[in-house]
Amino acid sequence: MGKMRIRKGDTVCVITGKDAKKEGKILRRIPDRDLVVVEGVNVVTKHVRPSAKSPQGGLVKQEAPIYASKVQLVCPSCGKATRVGRAFLEDGRKVRVCKKCGEIVDKV
């Protein structure tokens, strides 16, 4: 498993599969299995039994995890799906960098 270069709250673009070219925000990461849950992507219908948590029950639509390798970060400055690089600032902090425009992705 590779290092995840995307974080919760990042806007990503799906690059392959049935949801290709869809964009959404990362809701959850599962780093040990290399998975991410993206808002509005890979929506599945789940049968839910009535319980204390959901007294109604029935069919519930929710996002299922997809592999992190199927998504690319959307750069906030250039707006394109891009790979993520690493760089160090003068004060020694490590930041994520857009490979297309070279701008810093992290909110400094």
Image (cartoon, rainbow, N blue to C red):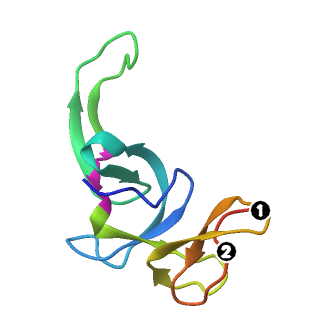
Is residue 66 shown in magenta?
A: yes
Q: Residues within 10 Å of mark 2 (few under 14, many from 20)?
A: many
**CA distance for labels 2 and 1:** 8 Å
- 86, above or below 37, in the image: below
> Mark 2 touching mark 1, by CB under 8 A?
yes
Q: Residues within 10 Å of mark 1 (few under 14, many from 20)?
A: few
Q: Magenta segment, which residues?
A: 62-68
Residue found farthest to the top:
52
Where residue 93 appears, as percent x and y from the top left, is: 70, 58
Where residue 103 appears, as percent x and y from the top left, is: 66, 81
Question: What residue lies at 30% left-to-right and 57% top-to-bottom?
Answer: 2
Q: Quadrant of the C terminus?
A: bottom right
Question: What residue lies at 48% left-to-right and 48% top-to-bottom?
Answer: 27
Tell me where residue 41 sits by quadrant: bottom left
Residue 92 is left or right of residue 63, and the answer is: right
The answer to which of 4 and 30 lies nearer the viewer is 4
- 1, above or below 33, in the image: below
What amino acid does circle 2 point to? Ile
What amino acid does circle 1 point to? Val
The answer to which of 106 and 14 lies nearer the viewer is 106
Question: What residue lies at 47% left-to-right and 59% top-to-bottom?
Answer: 6
Is residue 73 shown in magenta?
A: no
Q: Which residue lies under the disc numbered 1?
A: 108
Where residue 3 appears, as percent x and y from the top left, is: 37, 56
Where residue 17 appears, as percent x and y from the top left, is: 20, 72
Residue 7 is left or right of residue 67, and the answer is: right
Q: Which residue lies under the disc numbered 2?
A: 104
